[in-house]
Amino acid sequence: MNSLVKQFGKDQGLVFVEIIRASPKPIRAQEIKQQLIDAGVKKADVDRHWTRVQRVIKLHPQITMVSTRYEWSTERQPARNSLDVLAGNLLAKLPAWLARALVQNVTDALASAGTADAGWVDQEFEKARLVADLAVAVEVLQTRGDTITGVVKLFTEEARRKRLWPLGQPGETVPFDPGSHDAEAQAPEPGTAVRIARSGYVWRGGGEPIVAAKAIVAV
């Protein structure tokens, strides 16, 4: 009990979460608070902090409301839900324990291949691929001598934000890889030394890197 009181002094929200998690059945707010009061925390402090935490604790990916009771779920909410909370400009306003849980929920889902959230990864890749296509188009215009330095910079920054990275640099000599390169003329045998004529882009946002736009190469 003393450890509970000590922990409450450091992170009240996390203690409320732990009480819900440890409860063998759905638990009312009054029961949550009573456990802390019985452990030696002042009632006024419990009430004050519960009022502050109550409005956000329901956003936890593993806490659900059953009538007026709080219940811990071994199955997390869809990662998309957690991402929506984080993306809604709430992160700076959320307690650290909740932000950590939401971030972990999204991270775990994206790291697990073959889950229901894989569809969300695919959607994000498609968005990134579109940016890759635009970046390639801008590079083509620059090659023609168009004065688009500012546009190139803009799209380069956008590509970085979309977790897109150049696939080779113009003039670089590399072994031909059909999965990463398209030849200007007839494709050579894999492994043949080729020169990159136009950079491609690889997306690094969903586990293994994915080629979003192949580099154009010449023998």
Image (cartoon, helix red, strand yellow):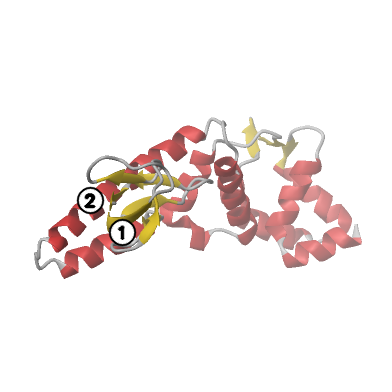
Identified at 61% across, 42% down, the residue is 61
* 23 relative position to 69: left or right: right
- With respect to residue 33, does 118 lie above or below? above
Q: Nearer the viewer, mark 1 or mark 2?
A: 2
| Label 2 Cα crowd, 10 Å radius (few <14 / some 14-19 / many 20+) | some
Amino acid on which disc 1 is placed: Glu
The mark nearer the N terminus, 1 or 2, is 2
* 169 relative position to 94: left or right: left
Please name whichever residue, 186 or 6, is drawn nearer the observer in this view of the structure.
Answer: 186
Please name whichever residue, 11 or 62, is drawn nearer the observer in this view of the structure.
Answer: 62
Identified at 63% across, 50% down, the residue is 101
Q: Which residue is mark 2?
A: 134
Identified at 39% across, 41% down, the residue is 189
Quarter of the rendering occupied by the N terminus: bottom right
x and y, in percent, of residue 162 in the image: 37, 54
Q: Which residue is mark 1?
A: 158
Mark 1 in CB contact with mark 2 (< 8 angstroms):
yes
| Label 1 Cα crowd, 10 Å radius (few <14 / some 14-19 / many 20+) | some
x and y, in percent, of residue 141 in the image: 13, 58
* 40 relative position to 52: left or right: right
Query: Regarding mark 2 in the picture, which secondary structure is present there?
Result: helix
For this orientation, the residue located farthest to the right is 1
* 1 relative position to 161: left or right: right
Residue 59 in sight here? no
Please name whichever residue, 207 or 34, is drawn nearer the observer in this view of the structure.
Answer: 207
Residue 118 in sight here? yes
Amino acid on which disc 2 is placed: Leu
Q: CA distance from mark 1 to mark 2?
A: 10 Å
